[in-house]
Amino acid sequence: MLTLLQIDFPFEGPFGEDMHHAMQDLAQSISQEPGLIWKLWTENPATQEAGGVYLFSDAQSAQNYLTMHEARLSASGVKGIRAKLFSVNTPLSKICNGPIQ
């Protein structure tokens, strides 16, 4: 079953185009994660937050990624990581133009 993972955490930047340049290697690495279908990168400079919304092919892949990513963020000194996992209702999401094939 498709699984959505939502993660956000305190982040002081960079944001926007600077984030794009700084995080390209990380984005390439994430794109190769097992079970990942897509990721939307999220950022809010006003509240100093960043994160992402991920769609995985299955719950185990999403959980494996979450475990690895929380460890990576924590090792970088990030605190206050918030994460949620959700099953995706595919038929209803397709009606509402969700990016699901």
Image (spheres, grey):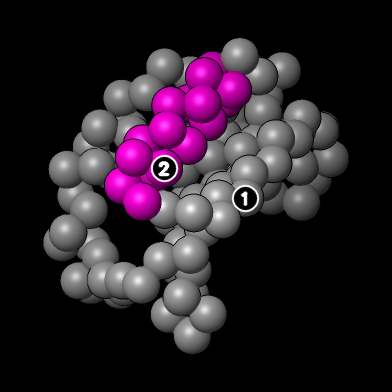
What residue would you read off at disc 1? 82
Q: In this view, does 95 lie to the left or right of 59?
A: right
Q: In this view, does 56 lie to the left or right of 92?
A: left
Q: Does the magenta stretch include residue 70?
A: yes
Q: Report the residue at 48% width, 37% height from top.
A: 70
Q: Position of residue 40 (x, y in %)?
A: 47, 51
Separation of residues labelled 1 and 2 (CA atoms):
12 Å
Q: In this view, does 92 lie to the left or right of 41?
A: right
Q: Considering depth in this image, is 98 or 3 the residue closer to the camera?
A: 3
Asked whether residue 94 appears in the rendered view, the answer is no
Which of the image's four quarters has the C terminus? top right
Marks 1 and 2 in Cβ contact (< 8 Å): no
Q: Start and end of the magenta stretch?
A: 61-77
What residue would you read off at disc 2? 74
Q: Report the residue at 42% width, 33% height from top.
A: 71
Q: Earlier in the sequence, mark 1 or mark 2?
A: 2
Q: Report the residue at 49% width, 54% height from top.
A: 79
Badge 2 amino acid: Ser
Q: Is residue 92 magenta?
A: no
Q: Report the residue at 17% width, 43% height from top.
A: 25
Residue depth check, mark 1 versus mark 2: number of the one nearer the observer: 2
Badge 1 amino acid: Arg
How crowded is the residue under tag 2: few (<14 C-alpha within 10 Å), some, or many (20+)? Answer: few
Q: Considering depth in this image, is 90 or 5 the residue closer to the camera?
A: 5
Which of the image's four quarters has the N terminus? top right
Secondary structure state at the residue bearing disc 2: helix
